[in-house]
Amino acid sequence: MAQDAEDAEEPIVVTGSRIVRDGNDAPTPVSVISAEEIATEAPANISDFVNSLPAVAGSQTAQSNSGSLSSSNSGINALNLRELGSNRTLVLLDGRRSVTSSAAGLVDINTFPQSLIKRVEVVTGGASSVYGSDAVAGVVNFVLDREYEGFKANYEYGITTYGDVPNHKLELTGGTSLMDDRLHVIGSVEYFDQTGVDTIDRDWNTHTFIVDNPDYVIGNGQPERIWGSGIGEAILSPGGLITSGPFKGTYFGAISPTTGEASVNQFAYGQTTGRYTIGGDYLLDDYHFGSNSLASHEQRLGFFGRVGFEVTPTLEVFAQVSWNRFKGRSYYQQTPSSATIQLDNPYLPQSLVDEVNAYNLANGTDISSITIGTSNAGIPAAGGANERTVERYLFGAEGEFDLLGGVNWDASYQMGRADLDQNLINTWLNSRLAAMTDAVDDGTGNIVCRVNIDGDATNDLPGCVPINRIGIGGVTQEAVDYLFQLTPFRNQVIKQDVAAVNFSMPNLIDLWAGPLSIAFGAEYREESLKSNLDPLQYEERWLYGNYKPDNGSFDVKEAYVEAIVPLFDGAEFNGAFRLTDYSSSGTVNTWKLGLVWQVIDDIKLRATYSRDIRAGNLLDLFATGTARTNAISRPLLDGAGNVTGASVSDQFVQSATGNPQIDPEVAKTIGIGAVFTPTFMPGFAFSADYFNIDLKDAIGSLSAEQAVLFCYEQKIAQQCLNIEYTGGQRFSTGQNLDIATIDLPLFNFAKQKVSGIDFEANYRTPLGPGDLSLRAVATHYIENVSDDGLSYPVDSAGAGLPSWRYRLSASYEYEGFRTSIVGRGFDDGVISNDYVVCTVNCPLSYPDARTINNNYRAGAFYLDTNFTYSFDLEGTSAQLLFAVKNLFDKDPYIYGAGSVGGNNVAAYPRTDRSLYDTLGRTFRLGFRVEL
């Protein structure tokens, strides 16, 4: 709702408009979070608080992106309004852009000085005509307390009820005025440290998956997919499982300290489907299962400073600097892979060798090797150890002068730089691991790498250390050290330069119903990306992080004008127009039309209609094809090229590429709302706002699973040609061949549309000896439809995006005591709106109406409590705080989230951690002092 929580008499710029005016007259819906609310809940980082707002959905957090290795996004906290994508939410610091923390255009809000944030304003609607590109879903503006005076220190400690994820946060903040209050200086130092948890170490993470139904045959009345428990991987084991041939199902267990050989066992298959077994030895994959990080290791250090000098009472010059460093480590998975083991490999148990030789003799065959699937026990899990340094320097002036009813102006120049060190840990070079795996006796009893004694000097690998991947317990530290002697690394430097000037005239001329207000300005922005890496590195094939040199730059020139025109008593028109020229895609325009009508003192109506855009960011334009290894469920075809219902799992390399030819995406946004502030109930306010965002030519790419299904099921030739098979072949139709590579180029999708209603209510009143504050915020999502233009529209509202999200809070304050209770959550829904539920007599299954036995996704309600006590400590203001999040330690709902057949699915939690709390009950203790 319009900002009305504070400073009613102070002219401020309310986010959503450049016109300086009283906060009660905000022309667009703005939800405001005060510094008091943030301090009471004491989040470990401010993103945790903002992400609890119902309008914020699908944000990237350090927990949700722990597997984003090749993209280097792990550890970033990036906000996402309306689940339209973080790169369609414009994040501002004091009304200005900030340099991004990744080439994907993500702004890490942990780089903002949390202790100096005065309030957070969230505009839930398009604002590109006012602020420029990226404000398709809305704007989140972090407003600083630039006038702070004094000194304050804050220390907080957090830990879960399970005794893990301990973290410490220390903040030191100061501000002072000098030279008769003409010189004002503020500064802050922030430090945060967290010890993560390297696996999904929670009892709720059970073997629940959605898989292809092994009993399904087209037309037999069975559901095509089934949701169930007691399911595990059937194509690997920790010490190796033979996956093909007459010895399929033989797996290797622990290595005997007496014989030095692995035990030989037989895998008990249940019903198999793709890479899974239903029942049987489904627990055998537990080295891989849940091996993704529950919480990342993090260390953050930030400095912020601002100096403002009042040259005259109407002119201030200022300089601002910030420096932030992030160090993080998280683990993607205990990487599964396949390997070919020659029969003369000395690590093979002699009993198996004898059995194979006997089989060859009896059947006239010549089996000389076996193929195993393994989760590589003894080789540490792959992960990322990223370091980011983000700097921002701002210089400018602002003031006012008496002309044309008064003019407020500001001019600024800012330089931003982000240094991104992308270092993958425990990530091997495929050729090196293959050479180490192919071990052989050199004839003298020494085990060596075959490449060094095969008589071919061109493939020698100096210093090669053989590795024993047969069984559990055979991998030596020497082998691990040699395997990871080299790991993928890339440094990227992102630079952003912005020069801007803005003018605001709130009382230009008096019209029939009030003053005409206008604002206008211009901005020049340049962004560049430069990659630094060893050229030899990207000529090799790594497991993950096949980095390539992404380089490029673009500039943007734009000018805007905004006006507020009074129509009659209580009604006004608000309009804005911006002309933008991108060096990458040409000239575009954006605009906004708005109406506000104060019908009576109690009721205000408002409506907006806008055209908003987002142009391609650095990664969209210049990504050269960073590759990562994964697995895909490939449908099997009959002789006519039609899917049979059966599938196999293929390991492949996924290559995502940018596109310098992409056009800006364009959104038309409608907003209609009402604000109710009854005079008979002082302190109460209620608002309801309908929104409808219709996005055309959306920039994006398909997932690997979509590309395969579009090729095999829907026979879309364009997607088939993006698939390369073993041997380098590409075809315009699907094939019963092993997939080697899938290209995922960016392009302009057909459209995406999201609509819904935002509700907000506030009430503050004296109660007894203290003050009671109530607040309720809710969003009802009607639709969130994505249409790629190739197949069928997909609506996530009510599925991955709940139909209802809400946050309810109540606080009471009395003589230094403040307590608050927060209830947050979302409603029940479905796993996918495209699923058709049935168990018998199922209709025919289609790509846009797949049959499944269960499509239920449970809602969740979490209760948080917060307590603070303020007191005087020898003349110093002090405060103690205690906060509990997820008070009842509610477990997430387990329903087998993830794609069907991906090799990382089992490593990830069997829930949607963008929806559910996966840490459990957490406690925070804190102590604050202020002079």
Image (cartoon, rainbow, N blue to C red):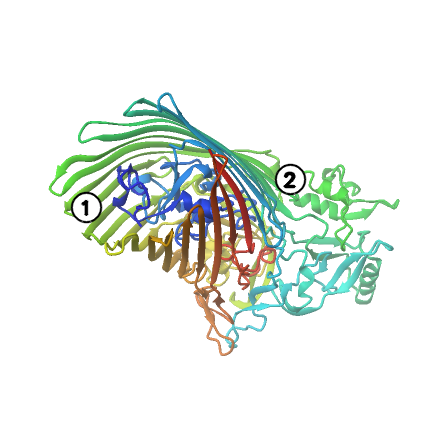
**Neighbour class for label 1 at 10 Å: few (<14), some, many (≥20)?**
many
What is the three-letter code of the residue carrying label 1? Glu
Q: Left or right? Give the position of 780 relative to 157.
A: left
Tell me residue 103's x, y (percent).
Answer: 48, 39
Front label number (2 vs 1)? 1
Residue receiving disc 1: 572
Q: Which residue is mark 2?
A: 487
Instruction: Pick whichever, 461 or 755, lies toward us.
Output: 755
Residue shown at 12% from the left, 39% from the top: 511
Q: CA distance from mark 2 to mark 1?
A: 61 Å
Residue 843 versus residue 355 in the image, above or below? below
Residue placed most toward the observer, 454 or 262: 262
> Splitting the image into 4 quarters, where does residue 618 fall?
top left
- Examine the image and state in which quarter residue 245 appears: bottom right
Residue at the image point whose x is 20% and y is 38% from the top: 517
Where residue 729 sits: x, y (%)? Answer: 56, 52
| In front of the other: 498 or 555 | 498
Q: Is residue 414 visible?
A: yes
Tag 2: residue type?
Thr
| Relative vertical location of residue 192 with respect to residue 889 in this rendering, above or below | above
Residue 885, image x and y in percent?
A: 51, 53
Of the image marks 2 and 1, the number of the one nearer the N terminus = 2
Callout count: 2
Q: Are marks 2 and 1 in contact (CB under 8 Å)?
A: no
For this orientation, the residue located farthest to the right is 444
Labelled disc at residue 679: none
Q: Secondary structure at mark 1?
A: strand
Which class describes the residues within 10 Å of circle 2: few (<14), some (14-19), or many (20+)? some
| Residue 672 percent location from the top left of the image | 26, 54
What secondary structure is marked by label 2? loop
